[in-house]
Image (cartoon, rainbow, N blue to C red):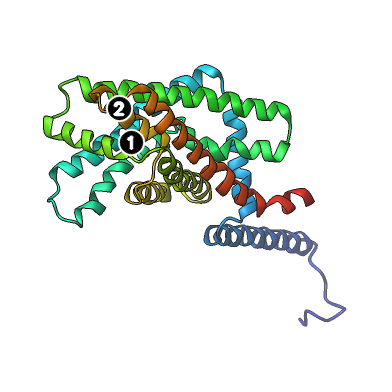
Amino acid sequence: MNPTDPTRVTDPDDAPRTKASRAAAARTDEQRAEVENEAVEKATHMSARLVYEVVLREGEEELSRPRSSLIFSGLAAGVCIAFSVLGEALFLTYLPDVPASYLLENLGYSLGFMLVIMGRLQLFTENTITTVMPVLTRRSLNCLLATARLWGIVLTANTAGCLVAASFLYWTPAIQPEVQASIHALSLHATGFGPVAGFFKAIPAGLLMAALVWMMSAGQRAEGFFIILTFTWLIAAGDFTHIVAGSVEMFYVVFSGDLDAGPAILGFFLPVLLGNIVGGTAVFTAMAWGQVREEIARS
């Protein structure tokens, strides 16, 4: 029988079957579209606006954390960052004394940062971008005060943790004498620049730490390891100064008697702290905010 013949008798079951087939086909198309969209999203880099949203959300979560959580997390970060000093000292002690060893030696500096960042502990220099984004977005006094509160708590806790770690490295027999000698040499070098040089050497370190946070927010978890390794290695290889890791070295040379408390604070701690803030907030965070500011205002 000709299917186009107007005299053809229509089976009443055909209509439901046709509707069901169309619905199934539509569902298949939707599923295919979802799969394609997921593939495109995986293959496409996150836009600056999306990265900003991730950093903003992380910053808002940090600002809402209880004081006790910030204190203990900051203390743990200060203690764990000492493994950057210890790792670099181990490489310095046991690598052959050739110029190329300098590049390998500075890989040890990344160890403490991996413990802290991948362990989601509170590190002051990370907060020079995460907790500043809410201030730039909300522009409220309450948000500014909350950021100042968090900075004060985390910096104090980080410094206290560094004091504990440096005490352990210097006063206990856990570290071999030859490694202690390397720690001493590294600490003298890190704290021996003077306040002006220390300030300017801290600016690239602050910028790199803020860039690290930005890139970690844009990447996958598996990529985080290599981002941390690369950026923190560059801080050490570039002979830049980080306030938290540098505080371990500062306390170590204070204990050894090579640096008095006053020059340690005024000549090292404060200039490096200001340099890290300038690099992380005034330079990188300001530029990151500038590229999304108009998009945020239009939304």
Q: Which residue is mark 2?
A: 259
Vertical order, 68 against 94 (above or below): above
Which residue carries the number 1 mark? 191
In-front residue for pair 263/11: 263
- Above or below, comparing residue 263 to residue 281 in the picture: above
- Residue 6 sits in quarter: bottom right
Locate the N terminus and report the quarter of the image it occupies.
bottom right
Residue farthest to the right? 6
Q: Secondary structure at mark 1?
A: loop
Residue 77 point in image, percent of width and height: 40, 29
How far from the left and from the top, in percent, is residue 264?
Answer: 37, 28
Label 2 neighbourhood size at 10 Å, few (<14), some (14-19), many (20+)? Answer: some
Left or right: 174 in relation to 35:
left
Q: How many numbered tags mark residues here?
A: 2
Residue type, label 1: Thr
Q: Looking at the picture, how far across and down is residue 227, in whole percent?
A: 41, 50
In this view of the protein, which residue sits in the foreground, 274 or 157? 274
Question: Distance of mark 2 from mark 1, alpha carbons?
Answer: 9 Å
Identified at 29% across, 34% down, the residue is 83
Tell me the residue at 19%/39% (across/down). 90
Q: Is residue 42 left or right of residue 178?
A: right
**As rendered, which of 202 and 150 lies closer to the eye?**
202
Q: Which amino acid, by three-letter code, is at mark 2?
A: Leu
- Residue 76 visible to the viewer: no
